[in-house]
Amino acid sequence: MSLAEAVRKIREAGVDAVGVVSRDGSVLAADLPAGVSRETFSIMCATIHGAGMTISNELRRSPPKRITLHVDEGTVVIAEVGRRALVVFVLAHGSDFDGLLPGIRPFLEEIANETG
């Protein structure tokens, strides 16, 4: 399965938008709303994840598995998938990310395999 196919399957599971980005901020695959800059989106998500890593390191804690941003319109989740990639999920208000996980786990595993 390609990254684009995995992204499509995740969207079909009920996610409003999704991006697969490298830890350095490169876009690997994405399905984002019109008008959203893929490059800005991916770079900022990688930056947020990097900030979380720095905070965890300073606190002598394990690295974050995911970072969640709650906004009035919904939730953005930045999650590690494998050693080299992050998957960013944009969810509508009231969506249950933990409830979606069982259905999308196979696609996340495929992304982890594809990205190393």
Image (cartoon, rainbow, N blue to C red):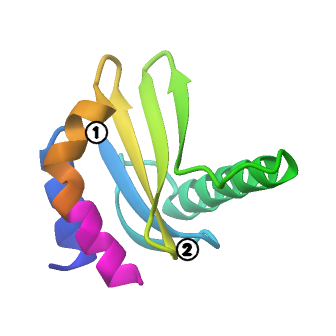
- Give me the residue at 67% from left, 53% from top: 62
Q: Where residue 113 sits in the image (x, y, percent)? A: 31, 80
Numbered tag placed on residue 50 in the rendering: none
On the rendered structure, is 61 left or right of 105?
right
62 lies above or below 96: below
Numbered tag placed on residue 16 in the rendering: 1
Instruction: Name the image quarter holding residue 99.
Output: top left
Quarter placement of the C terminus? bottom left
Range of residues picked out in magenta? 107-116
Number of residues whose C-alpha sits closer than 10 Å to that of mark 1, classed few (under 14), some (14–19) or many (20 or more): some
Cβ atoms under marks 2 and 1 closer than 8 Å: no
53 lies above or below 21: above
Q: Where residue 5 sits in the image (x, y, percent)? A: 17, 70
88 lies above or below 109: above
Numbered tag placed on residue 26 in the rendering: 2
Quarter placement of the N terminus? bottom left
Residues 67 and 63: in front is 63
